[in-house]
Amino acid sequence: MELESTASVTQAISGTWDVVFHLAAVASGSEARADPGLAWEINAAGTARLAELLGARCLAGENPLLLVISTGEVYGPGEGKPRRETDPARPCSPYAASKLGAEIAARDVASRTGLRVMVVRPFPHTGPGQDLRFVVPALAERLGAARRLGAPAIKVGNVEAVRDYLDVRDAVAAYRVLADRGTPGETYNVASGEGLSIAEIARRLMALLEWPVSLEPDARLMRRADIRHLVGDASRLRALGWHPTVPLDQTLKELVDAQAH
């Protein structure tokens, strides 16, 4: 499905749908910064196209549910405490801003057509096979390369930033729970509630690889508007019976093992 094309979106959703899990997006923050216009076109305008077509189905008598998979990054800078769904959105990157635009677009369609919409804000998640554009697999790849080459250091961005990491399987399980038990019109965080610095993630990866190195800051890897602390409060989701089941150390081991093969 090409979200820039109404014809493509129309073809993709042909048939009858009970639930649509909408994850299609420019999902890389670096790609969104490189071309903010494209991020807005795909993430916000593309979601508007999808929601509008589903809204037309509602007006024709169908009743699909649209889960808009947004991001915890829409909360932006905070006070060092877990973010709740009632906290204001203050996006500070093209990626986060365009995802907030997607939320607004879907809610607009819901108000006009009766389309059932749920906004889901996952915090960072990872797992084996994740693209190297994302922090954890990129760190693991650099550390693995350092081990192979016998290098004593690797270049890194801001390792003091604190993030809330889930296993991707727990994130997917959350989407399923929300489809079954969530309330249309509501917003739900998907998060563990626990924060770890990128430096701590690197330390755990070094232990798995048995190759300790120095972390050397590189300005080219720094974000000008980085969020220092991004941890989510998922109490609303947990009340529906969801909880994380995969320990982060298991996730990291499986990710490292996958990169080694």
Image (cartoon, rainbow, N blue to C red):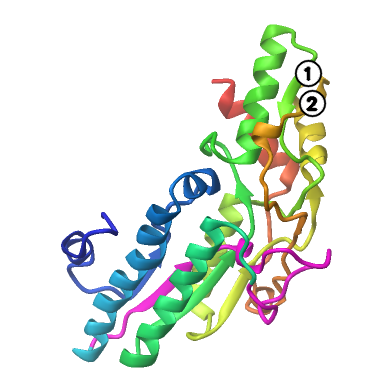
Q: Is 68 displayed left or right of 164 in the figure?
A: left
Q: Which residues are magenta?
A: 62-89
Q: Position of residue 147 (x, y in %)?
A: 72, 14
Q: Position of residue 201 (x, y in %)?
A: 77, 39
Q: Nearer the viewer, residue 167 or 124?
A: 124
Q: Nearer the viewer, residue 99 or 19?
A: 99
Is 3 colored magenta in this rendering?
A: no
The residue beneath circle 1 is 153
Q: Is 59 displayed left or right of 162 in the figure?
A: left
Residue at 80% from the left image edge and 19% from the top image edge: 210
Asked if residue 70 can be seen in this view, the reply is no
Q: Tell me if mark 2 has few (under 14), some (14-19) or many (20+) residues whose alpha carbon lies within 10 angstroms of its own.
A: few
Q: Nearer the viewer, residue 88 or 181?
A: 88
Pick whichever of labels 1 and 2 is earlier in the sequence. 1
Cβ–Cβ below 8 Å for labels 1 and 2?
Answer: yes
The residue type indicated by label 2 comes to Glu
